[in-house]
Each structure stands twice: as structure tokens, then as C-alpha cells.
Image (spheres, rainbow, N blue to C red):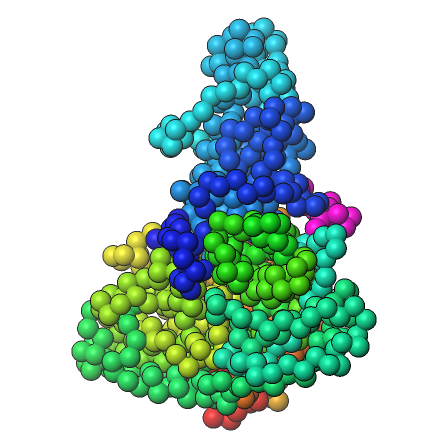
Amino acid sequence: MNKHVKTITPETSDLSRRSFLVGTAATGLVLGYAGVPGIGDALAAAPANFEPSVWYSISPDGLVTVTCGKADMGQHIASTMAQIVCEELGAKWSDMRVNLASNDPKFNDPVLGAQITGGSWSTMMNFDAMSRAGAAGRMALTEGAAASMGVPASELTVRDSMISHAKSKKQMSFADIVKSGKATKTFTPDELKAIKLKTPDQYTMIGVSVPQIDIPSKTNGTAKYGIDVMIPGMAYGAIVTPPVRYGATVKSVDDSAAKSVPGFIKAVILDDKTQTTTGWVVAVAGTYANAKKAAAALKISYDGGPNAKLSSQSLLDEAKRLQGLDDSGQFFVKDGDVAAALGSAAKVLEAEYTTSINIHAPMEPMNATAEFKGDILHIYSGNQFATRSGAIAAGAAGIDPKFVVMHQMWLGGGFGRRLDADMMVPAVQAAKAVGKPVKVIYTRENDMTMDFSRPLTYQKVKAGVDGDGKLVALSHDVVSAWPTQRWGIPDFLSPSVDKKGPLDAFTVNGSDFFYTVPNHYVRAIKNEMAHNATPSGQLRSVAPGWTFWAVESMIDEIAAATGKDPAQFRISLLDGAGKNDGGAQRLRNTLLAAMGLAGYGTKKLPKGEGMGVACVSSQERATASWTACVAHVAVAPSGEVTVKKLTVATDVGTQVHPDNIRAQVEGAALWGLSLAMYEKATLKDGGIEQTNFDGYTPLRMSQMPEVAVAVIANGENATGVGEPAVTVVAPAIGNAIFNASGARVRALPITAEAVKGAMKA
């Protein structure tokens, strides 16, 4: 679904909510971008530098600095971009450096689109463009060297930052050529497209586990995260949030007790025209410790607003009501005639699947530092969506987005949480109110209770099989909040196939699977109550984290009902017919690889143990990484489940950095396990009940299973690896539980009580 990723262009400078959400910091006005301490300044290249592309420069000392337009949250995407450039440029790896891009309009690339990091898109969507940028630099340097040496460019070879002429034994380093000033060739977009890139058999850097460029600074403490930002004369802000997640307003603030706190400056009631926050107050003081003390001393009264009585059960009840309406929602998939096929089916199965609210909880809590320098607002923060975040900051300040300079920092975890810019709102408004820079740091409690969480979902699936046990029809209703619609960016929505208007495809991706089913309907239904009360965001894996929970569980249920092996049943459905051509075969291969590595079907397991399979085309159908999992579990009579081993196979096309890919797949699989078995947030009286890691309990080290990973690198286009393995683990575990105990579980997270209850049933 690449069509979602478009260049987001500025509209007007009016301060409407839409302009806040969609406007960018574009226009070519020079805003005096300053460097980020510890990272460098991607924009202030020395005059003698050679800049073949906006994305990298080569200095007179031969160092190649790649500017990464993606957020680096530990997935090493900055190093990956450098590695791709390095391959075609012909540089020596030890000469490579990285910078993180600001929101300078020159980084709003017409090919790469908005500065957004998510969807496992970064490598797949940047590989070609960064390769061409590297190749263009190599060609320009080669022409410069040829002019200096007086030899034909065609006779020169480039390797390890050196350009050599075999016949004359002459050679020049990149540094020599840059200092000569003879590297001057430029390329039009058409010329860039025409460059013939290397084929996989010619790679010398791609596919090599080179040292990650960011590791030294992150281990010696010199890498600067948002929480590390220090500006002379700055104050600190501690937020006080209402008991209701969204919709509350502040009735009054009594700061009399706060005034006795040393260094207390002011209590600022947020007036957020962007509607990102509601009912927040910021206590500003000279130190963060005193800001927290002042915040605790404030006496605030609230109007709880329209969501003050809602609970998780309220949201679930509303979801079920909406699903029961024939005219609710829009169709995402509408193939064949499901009603007729179900009516004539030999057997019809029906099941409901649910997932709970889930929280991101990155180790570095949300933070931002705001500073006004004349008319220019400077924001220091780690964020995943610079294009939108700059507009949110502008809206909070009441200024045109072109007057916002964003300084991108390293992220201490993101996972979709930093796609949102709420942390910038209190920093901006506090800085404006007190007339000095302000750094706002969320407490863990702020971070959890005000998270833009993964939404609670309810799904109803109905399937029909014929007399031979062949799947002939499947209907799938998905009810949830619509996080992407909340962003207010029309280009990120998809037209519905029934022409009822746009829908949020990021709530149903994955339901358009690669199995061949002649009659297949998928209905996307917005739960307005959940949309307003939570509100929800994108958490690592997005919709496939819940849609494949339903799809892959139902496929297993059908196999069991028809007496077929669930893995072989999947293989029969992955026949590549029609629109599934190509993709089905790649998914089938990953399933076979996972089965082989796990020994599925070849081992006699002890009583109470079982293996389950699942295979997915995450993150989206058009940008899939083909991934399969075999889960091996043990189920005790009490219903307690022990996950003994996860075996994951994934087809990544072209692998840039093998070690990094394995690390990301392993991490994603463990996150999937955590969501499947341990993580659950609940809404009560309009607020999230869990405030720290005692109540919200991700996977602990003691609960770690063995993880085996098989990476299939077949030379196809590079795919993403950050999220797909998240989505395949839960259904594989659920299916393994059934094979071990006969208990069919349909709600996440899976609890011992649910398993024991299903065993009795």
C-alpha cells in the first residue's frame, strides 16, 4: 500500500487544525538551522565539501557523512542508509559517518515522501534512492579523478575510497578529488533513474555485518537523546494530566502550595488548538526535581468531559453493537458473493477474536525541549514523523509551520509512540508562557496513562467449507478505533471498495491475505467511542498484530474442523491463483522453512505439549515481508502456558546487514510473545488504570523462550524486518495451545484462566 506514502505538501499558513496536522516546515525560507549537540549538523556543510546528494556529503578529509531522514530508535536505520550509500559509492566503511535529518524542506524528498518512520518501510522504500545517490557520487568522483589524472573515466576502478588507474598506476583518494574541486557533475531525476546499479552478485558491502556506526557513541555516552538536551538558561516542565485520557478540561488551578517550592516559575494550563491534548497543566521550575514537586503541589479541578465514565467493557460492548449493524463500516475487501457461498456451504464456522489496549512504554519516556529565538521556534526531540510533528509544534505555538526548526535526536525507543507529538505541546506552550527554553519530561506514569495506545479490537469471522473441506467463503469484520484517521492526513486513508468513503487501512491490513478464497469480504468498522476515548496510535506491527490473530486462528479452526493438518491446509490455500501470484509462493516457502527448522510433524512431543503454525504477509500486502512461525508450548492442567521455543522464518529479499536483521526478527518475535501472553491495559472511568511496570507487565527475562531464526535472502527487493515477526507469534502460540491441550483461545493476552476454561469446555 505504497500509495499511502505521498509527499505531504503545505497548504496555507492559516492556523486551522488541518494546517497544523498537514502543514510542513516547507517554503525555502532560511531559518538558521543549528546543529544538534553530539550528532552534528546535517545542514551546515563546509563550502569545500562535495555534496552529490542532499542525503550525503564528502568532506576534504574524505569522510562521508550520510544524513538519515528516518528516526533511529535502536534499529540502526542510520547505519543501514550509510551502508546502502557506501555500496554504490565505493567508500571505505571506516570513512562513513551519520547525521539525523532536521525538518529542513530540502529533506521532504519528492521520491521518498514525508519524513515518517514506521510500517517497516524505511529500507524497502529508501534502498533504490539511496543506492542511486551513492552511484551518482561515484560517477561524479570518477569523472573528477579522470580529469585530474588525464585518463578515461571508463578505465578507472573505485574501491575503499580510492580511485585507481591500473595502466598508469595512478590513484586518488576521495579526499584528493574533493580538495581538487573537480568533482562537479550533477544529475537530473531522469539521469538518476537511468543509472545502472549493481546486481546482488557484485555487492561487497550489502549483505555484510559491518560495525554499526552509532554503537560507539551510544556505548560511551556521547550520543544525545532528547532527554539529554541542555540549553543555557532553560527551565523544566512537569506535566499534570487529568484522570481522564481524553476530553477533560481544567476548571481551576490553585498554585498557592506550589509557590513555596524553590525555583517554581509558573503553572501553565495548556490551550492546545491542535486537539492533541486536553486538560493538561505544566508546572515550570528551575530544576526537574522542583518542577515535579510543584506539579504535585498543584490543586486542580477538572470537568471530566464526555468520556469520564467509559471502560474497556464499554468500548467492547460498543464494538459488538456496531458489528451487528448491517450498514456499519466500509468494505476493504469484497470478492465474490460471501452470503451465497455461506448459504450453500457444507459447514460454517464462526468465531469472535479480541485484543486489549496495549501500551508502547519505551525506555526513554516522552520529552521535548522548546526554545524561541526571535520568530523561530526550535524543538529538540526524538520523533518518528517530522513532517507532522513540526506542524503540531507550530499549532501549539500559534505560528506558521515554516517558522519551526526541528532538531532530531536519537530515540530511546519509539515503536510507533513517537509518531505522535504530544510531548512538544507542553514544552512549546510552557516556553512561550515563561519566556525561556523549557524541557518537558514525562514521568513513567504520564507516559503510560497518556500513551497513544494500540486500540482495543473486536473481530468477527465467519467461514464456510464445501463437502471436501475446501474453504469457499470468509467474512471478516474488524472493529477498532482508527488511529491514522486521527492524524487528519487524507493521503494516509484508503478508498473503500464499496465507495462509501475513505477508511483507515492501517486497521485492517493483513486481512487481505494471500490465501486463495473465492468469496472474501472484509469490513472495516470505526469504533467512534474508542476513537474518542482512548485515543489510539500505531504500535509496532499496527493492524496485522490483530488481523492475523483472527485470520491465522480461524485458518487453524477450519483445519481442525475438517480433519486436516493446519500447516498442509495453509499450503493448499497458498496456490498463487489470481492476485495472489508470486506472494503466495514466497509465503509458502517461509512456512516450509519454519516447519523444517522446528521439526514440525517429525517429533513426538510429550503429553501437554504442542506445536502451532502461522504465516503472515506483514506489514502490508504491497510491502510485505513473508514470515512464518512455529511455536512450541507446554500447557499445564492449571492452564499455565510455557512457551518453550519460537521458530521464525522470514523472506527479506535483499539483506543489508545480516546480524541486524536477525536481531530485529528476534526482538519482534519476543515483542509478539509479550503482547500474546503478558501485556494488557484497561480503561476505567475514562482513564488507563496501569501506571507503571508493576501493573503493565511486558515479557521478563525469566520468561524468555528459545528463539530460532531463518532468514531467506533471495536477491529480490529489500523488505522490512522491524515488525512482521510481531504479528505471527500470537496465532502460532494460540494454535500450539490447541494442539497441546484442546483449548481454543480467542482473546489476547492469553491467560491461564482462559486456557483452563477452554480445556473444560
Closer-to-camera residue (735/497): 497
Quadrant (top left, top right, bottom left, bottom right) of the N terminus? bottom left
Write the residue at 41% across / 88% down: 317
Residue 63 to residue 667: above or below = above
The answer to whether residue 8 is left or right of residue 262 is left
Instruction: Please name the predominant secondary structure of the magenta segment in the image.
Output: loop
**Extreme residue in the bottom direction:** 760
The answer to whether residue 368 is left or right of residue 487 is right
Closer-to-camera residue (315/519): 315
The answer to whether residue 730 is left or right of residue 423 is left
Residue 218 among magenta residues? yes
- Counting from the top left corner in percent of width and height, residue 343 is at 20, 82
Residue 567 visible in rendering: no
- Counting from the top left corner in percent of width and height, residue 358 is at 55, 74
Write the residue at 61% across / 77% down: 241
Closer-to-camera residue (463/174): 174
The answer to whether residue 3 is left or right of residue 387 is left
Residue 546 to residue 638: above or below = above
Write the residue at 30% across / 76% down: 329
- Counting from the top left corner in percent of width and height, residue 139 is at 48, 22
Write the residue at 67% across / 25% down: 61
Closer-to-camera residue (113/611): 113
- Counting from the top left corner in percent of width and height, residue 244 is at 55, 82
Residue 309 among magenta residues? no
Total label count? 0
Provide the residue span drawn in magenta. 208-224
Residue 210 to residue 669: above or below = above
Residue 166 visible in rendering: yes
